[in-house]
Amino acid sequence: MTQLFKCDTCRARKVKCDEARPQCGECRKRARTCTYRTRDPSVLVLDRTSATKTRSSTPRAGASARVSPPQETSIPLRFRNLRPTEEGDGVFQVFAPDRWSVRASKNGKTREEPSIDARERNLCPAPTRSLSSPENRLLSRWAAVMGSNPAYSHPLQAFGHWMALVPARIGTDVTLDLAVQYLIDSSEAYRLTRQINGNPARSTGEKALKSLQSAISSNRTDHSIALAIKMHFVAEVFMGLGTYYYVLHVTGMARMLQNRVSHRCEDKVDCVLIEASYFEEATESLLNGRDCVYDNGILARAMQDSSITATDFDTVSVMLAEQFVKIPRLARLVRESSARPDDVETFSQAVALANELYLDDLEPLMNKVLSDTSIVPTSAYKVATYFSESFHFSSIDLYTLATRYYTYRTLLFGLLQTLYGSGNPSAHFYIDKIEGQDIQAATALAMCVDYAMNVDLSFPLASLRVVAPIQMAFGTWLRLEKRARNAADAQRGRQMQEWSLELANGLLRDWKAPPDPLWMIRVKNEAFAGVRW
């Protein structure tokens, strides 16, 4: 008989045991209590260090009855990416050993070596997590919101490339995680129920906002806080534009990035955040009659970094942003020169800046970037009445770039016409050409609407992003009506004003924002063109 499965009594007395169950022969003969402890694996497992000291694998009498089992080495995992399934709507989460890979050496010991993925941490340092961690559950919810669509075609991409930086940072910062949860809850409230009150988004938002306020009061300006502000901005959009809370986050993001990159862009993350934020900041600057906080040459210096301007798309994006942020300054100069006709210096500054922006034309490079854009029959009935053909873009990125470019041109041409109308001989522009380019830019914006309204009906973010451009293009049709040389031009100007107003207000109602009356949109566009304030 083996000694491994002897009963406890025979083992303690060091006598032979026939291992009969439930009572061995020796214990039955001596009328002793017979018990077996083989069900407890601890009596069969020895500590590796003690096994090397003694030749016997059997515990001695009087020794501790339990020996702790060896601890398993757990390798932390790092989230790598999301991989769509071949069938259905699900996605797979791909994990890999985090930073260190454990390998066995010849002597049986383990040694750690850096993984190949370690160099990827420069842009998106990722946390370590187990498959059942709370961070991974939050990551799963994020994946459910993003879906299996490619990143370039997801509607959330309309808010910028910073969305791609979020998954790898989940679990690294409490404020960031709360912001992610708030964005997820608010998006679900909009997409699934469209009823905000019955969703936990409000309570989540209060917790996330308190955490964000605490972080900012501690003078934190790192990337995690900047991303948290962007997610609060998007979440407030989902909660309803009528609250206007999103404006606070636009201003807060601008101030934070201005402090972070007061001299130069620290890295690509800063440039991505600025590129995703300048349009809203420039719009708010125009409405408030101030210069844009990004109008300080930072983006121009960022173009010198080859890692940022690696493609034509990146180059034209940065160049457009650098020109767009100058529009609020030009509007202020035009308005001030109109209010003070004798101020020659202000008028000269306005003319110089207007010439700079007009002559630095992005159209050749823009046409190259949009070469894959096709023209298709218009499907949205709200657009087809006035435009039988529309643009079809290959990605959300191109759509966003195109709408910003045509919006920039309508604003610039409106300011140029205001300068020309001042009667000052210094403002010598080819006004007929500028008026034609103004109409072309506004028409191109209208041809972007059909694509925006058909990208994703459950997440109509692309159509939301076209509201401000359509409102700004309203000024083009207003100018056409005022300078109309015949009845046809006047009628077209009035019709397109009505169409722009109806389309923009319809989209605003869908996002729980009050519609703008006709007089308000007219006053706004006259202010955009530097006519009044």
Image (cartoon, rainbow, N blue to C red):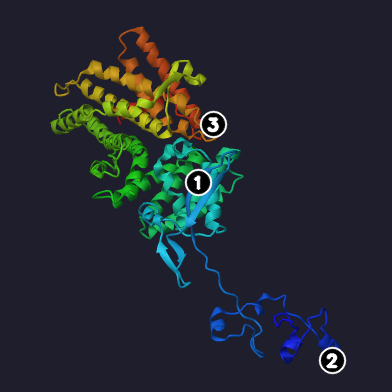
Residue at which label 2 appears: 30
Residue at which label 1 appears: 82
In the foreground, 410 or 244: 410
Q: Quick check: 255 left or right of 465?
A: left
Amino acid bearing label 1: Leu
Amino acid bearing label 3: Leu
The CA span between labels 1 and 3 is: 23 Å
The CA span between labels 3 and 2 is: 84 Å
In the foreground, 463 or 523: 463
Kindly identify the residue that appears in the image at 38 percent across and 60 percent down: 218
> Which is more foreground, mark 3 or mark 2?
2
Residue 454: % across, % down: 50, 27
> Which is more foreground, mark 2 or mark 1?
2
Residue at which label 3 appears: 457
Position of 94 relative to 495 (above/below): below
**Mark count:** 3
Evaluate whether residue 205 shows in this view: no
> Which is more foreground, mark 1 or mark 3?
1
